[in-house]
Image: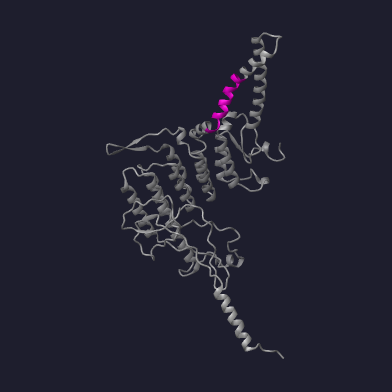
């Protein structure tokens, strides 16, 4: 027979459990100090526009009226980890997490006020004001969804194909119809934000500096719209510089081939990655054309990488001559002048021969090249100056082509035909047969 627990013992255990639960430390929420970092002229209702709470930005400075609505924001274009999917009451993760929707008209009104405030702030907006305007646009947390993979698509059944169910019109209240409407609304919001950022950075009085260019690239990369990046990269080195003369804004032409007009390689690589992520090979080639293939980039590379080696080469003969003259003092078979000349000639021949062999071996090495290689007969000087361009084209070819090395050279799309023609114009070869595995 099963014995029942004694009532007194049960009450004692229950009391002990309640006492332990009362003594256990409770998990307190993290106290995050939030200070208002940006003031936006938004007078929208919460139902019309949703603004997620974010951490403060250290670089944003307010320049909007004091009557505007203020809230906290963080650096908008920083990479954030994907939010975990929402969970049901039973602990199972839902298959899809839908962010709150934004009204395109409300977003358009907000960005119009941002642009108008920027233009009214000063005849020539400062770099801080331009960065604040771009970050205000970037605070809208929207991202272009990635295209569905083959595994996530619904398999097409033979019965549906025979009955014509795949092409049947969708009902207005069906889930797929609602998803398409939400996707169209998201595209409208992305177009509004992209056009607003483009309007700000192409304003004649706005100076495109390095931080401004970085903020714009990060914004367009997050929105998934790299189509305007080649033009903006070209404007970075060709846009006239505004100057305020006697209360009138005057524009001074710039030299696009100066070292200061070269785009930072880190920013160029960031823009190239944005184009590759969206599978836009035209924008990728345009980014390479206006960054790595420019004369300004070559001049900057010479100053940064070739200045010290050049000084070493120029200073080597005088150093060798001083050493040869000192060596001539330790012999008595020849005259000092003849001994100095013999020692100087021998040392110069040894150093010159060894340095030449090492330089040729370094510049002709192709182990790091995967698909884009230099054509035979290309000068070593040209190879060194435009090695970054070749590496960028190699990255594009590996990103848009087949992944398996056995299928290299079998791409027959129009995109790869453009890539092959561009490589040939730049003294490069895509998938050189002589360098393929088993052909050398």
Residue farthest to the left, as pictured? 246
Numbered label tally = 0
* Magenta run includes residue 231: no
Residue 202 found in image quarter: top left
Horizontal relation, residue 389 to residue 140: left or right? right
Q: Is residue 322 above or below residue 137?
A: above
Compared with 365, 232 (above or below) is: below
Residue 423 shows in this picture: no
Q: Is residue 235 visible?
A: yes
Residues 431 and 368: in front is 368
Query: Where, by quadrant of the figure, is residue 369 drawn?
Result: top right
Front-most of residues 251 and 61: 61
Q: Which secondary structure type mostly characterizes the magenta part of the structure?
A: helix
Residue interval drawn in magenta: 304-319
Q: Is residue 97 above or below residue 269?
A: below
- At 68% from the left and 39% from the top, the residue drawn is 436
In-image side of 15 versus 267 (left or right): right
- Could you tell me which quadrant the N terminus lies in? bottom right
Measured as percent of width and height from the top left, residue 96 is found at: 54, 65
Residue at the extreme bottom of the image, as rendered:
1
Most foreground residue, 125 or 404: 125
Q: Position of residue 294 (x, y in %)?
A: 49, 35
Residue 313 falls within the magenta-colored stretch = yes
């Amino acid at each position: 027979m099963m014995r029942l627990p004694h009532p007194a013992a049960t009450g004692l255990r229950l009391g002990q459990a309640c006492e332990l639960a009362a003594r256990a430390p409770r998990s307190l929420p993290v106290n995050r100090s939030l200070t208002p970092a940006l003031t936006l002229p938004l007078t929208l209702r919460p139902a019309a526009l949703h603004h997620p709470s974010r951490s403060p930005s250290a670089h944003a400075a307010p320049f909007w009226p004091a009557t505007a609505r203020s809230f906290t924001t963080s650096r908008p274009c920083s990479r954030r980890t994907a939010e975990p999917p929402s969970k049901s009451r039973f602990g199972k993760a839902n298959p899809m997490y839908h962010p709150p929707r934004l009204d395109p008209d409300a977003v358009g009104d907000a960005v119009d006020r941002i642009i108008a405030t920027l233009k009214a702030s000063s005849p020539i907006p400062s770099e801080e004001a331009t960065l604040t305007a771009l970050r205000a646009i970037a605070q809208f947390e929207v991202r272009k969804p990635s295209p569905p993979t083959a595994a996530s698509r619904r398999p097409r059944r033979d019965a549906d194909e025979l009955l014509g169910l795949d092409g049947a019109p969708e009902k207005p209240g069906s889930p797929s119809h609602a998803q398409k409407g939400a996707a169209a609304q998201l595209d409208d919001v992305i177009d509004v934000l992209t056009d607003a950022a483009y309007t700000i950075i192409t304003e004649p009085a706005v100076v495109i500096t390095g931080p401004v260019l970085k903020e714009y690239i990060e914004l367009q990369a997050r929105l998934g719209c790299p189509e305007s990046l080649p033009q903006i990269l070209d404007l970075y080195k060709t846009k006239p510089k505004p100057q305020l003369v006697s209360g009138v804004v005057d524009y001074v032409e710039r030299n696009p081939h100066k070292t200061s007009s070269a785009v930072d390689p880190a920013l160029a690589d960031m823009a190239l990655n944005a184009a590759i992520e969206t599978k836009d090979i035209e924008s990728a080639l345009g980014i390479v054309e206006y960054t790595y293939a420019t004369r300004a980039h070559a001049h900057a590379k010479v100053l940064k990488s070739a200045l010290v080696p050049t000084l070493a080469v120029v200073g080597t003969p005088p150093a060798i001559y001083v050493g040869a003259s000192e060596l001539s003092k330790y012999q008595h078979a020849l005259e000092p002048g003849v001994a100095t000349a013999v020692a100087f000639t021998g040392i110069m021949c040894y150093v010159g021969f060894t340095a030449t062999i090492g330089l040729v071996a370094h510049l002709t090495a192709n182990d790091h090249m995967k698909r884009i290689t230099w054509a035979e007969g290309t000068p070593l000087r040209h190879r060194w100056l435009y090695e970054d361009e070749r590496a960028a084209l190699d990255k594009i070819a590996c990103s848009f082509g087949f992944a398996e090395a056995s299928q290299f050279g079998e791409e027959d799309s129009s995109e790869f035909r453009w890539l092959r023609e561009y490589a040939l114009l730049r003294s490069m070869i895509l998938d050189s047969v002589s360098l393929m595995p088993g052909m050398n």
